[in-house]
Image (tube, rainbow, N blue to C red):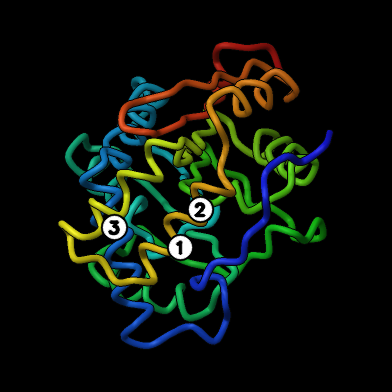
Amino acid sequence: MNNLRPQITEQLDHPDFGGEHLHRVLGDLERINRLLFNHLHIKKAFAKCMGGHTQVRLTDFGCGGGDVLRKLVDFSRKKGIAIQALGLDHNEQVLAYAKWKSADYPEIRFERWDAHSTSHDLSPCDVAVSSQFMYHLEDNELIALLGRIRSNSTLAVIISEVENHRLAARLFPLLARCLRLDPTSLSDGLNSMKSGFTASQLKSLAHRLPGNWNAKRYIPFRLLLTHNHSNTAP
C-alpha cells in the first residue's frame, strides 16, 4: 500500500531533546490531551472493552509522558479493577520523565521499545492502547505492527490519533496562544497533523486490516481505530 502521509521528524523525536524544555512540551501534550477530550475518548473505549472484567494487563505503545496510562490506572482504581500497566517508548529521556511523573503509580512500569524493529517480542496483554503515535509509521509498517499487537492482546486494541484536517491546523495556533504553549509544542503539533490521518484514510486502513476494525471520528478532530476481540472471530 502506498503511504500518502508525509513523514516529518518532530523536535520531540530527537534523542538529544531533553531537560526542562522536554518537560514543558510533555506537560503541554498532557494538557492538550485532557482539554481536547483525548483522555475521555480513550477511557470510554477502555471501559467498554473491559465489561465485567476485574483485572487487566494494559500496554501503551508509544506512551510518551505516560499520561494516558495514569488516567486509565485512575479509572481502574475507582472501578476496583486490578491493573498491570506497561508503557513503551523509544526515547530514554521521555521514559525518564514518564517514570518521574508516575512515581505514585506502582501499577505502571516502563520499557524502551523500537517500533521499527520486528525482532522485539511483544509482551502479552489484554488491552493495547496507543495515543498519537501510530502516524509516525508508514502504512505497511503500521499494518504489520497492528497485526502483531492484535495477536498479542486478548480483549481490545484502542488507537487514538489527531485528525489531519485543514480547520484543525488553523485553530491549533489560536489554542496554543490561549494556553501559552511552548513554541515547540505548537510546531510539533502542527507537524503531527500534517503527518496524521484524514478520517477517510483511517477508514481505508481499517478495511485493509485483518479482523473487524472500527474507525470513528470524534469532535474535536479526534480519530479512534479500535478492535474489540469479542466482536469478531479470531
- In terms of sequence position, does the residue under pointer 2 or pointer 3 come before the other? 3
Above or below for 124 versus 1: below
Q: Are marks 2 and 1 in contact (CB under 8 Å)?
A: yes
Q: Foreground mark, 1 or 3?
A: 1
Q: Foreground mark, 2 or 3?
A: 2
Task: Please give left or right for residue 127 compared with residue 42 in the image.
Answer: right
Q: Residue at x 36, y 65 (%)?
A: 185
Amino acid at circle 1? Asp
Q: Residue at x 31, y 85 (%)?
A: 20
Task: Please give left or right for residue 193 compared with residue 67 in the image.
Answer: right
Instruction: Work out how far the residue at label 2 is from the one at label 1, CA to CA, in angstroms.
Output: 6 Å
* Residue 153 image position (x, y, % from top left): 60, 36
Identify the residue position indicated by label 2 in the image: 192
Tag of residue 30: 3
* Residue 212 image position (x, y, % from top left): 64, 15
SS for callout 1 = helix
* Residue 234 image position (x, y, % from top left): 71, 18
Amino acid at circle 3? Glu
Identify the residue position indicated by label 1 in the image: 188
SS for callout 2 = helix
Disc 1 crowd, CA 10 A, few/some/many (<14, 14-19, 20+): some
Classify residue 205 by image quadrant. top right
Amino acid at circle 2? Ser
Q: Are marks 2 and 3 in contact (CB under 8 Å)?
A: no
- In terms of sequence position, does the residue under pointer 1 or pointer 3 come before the other? 3
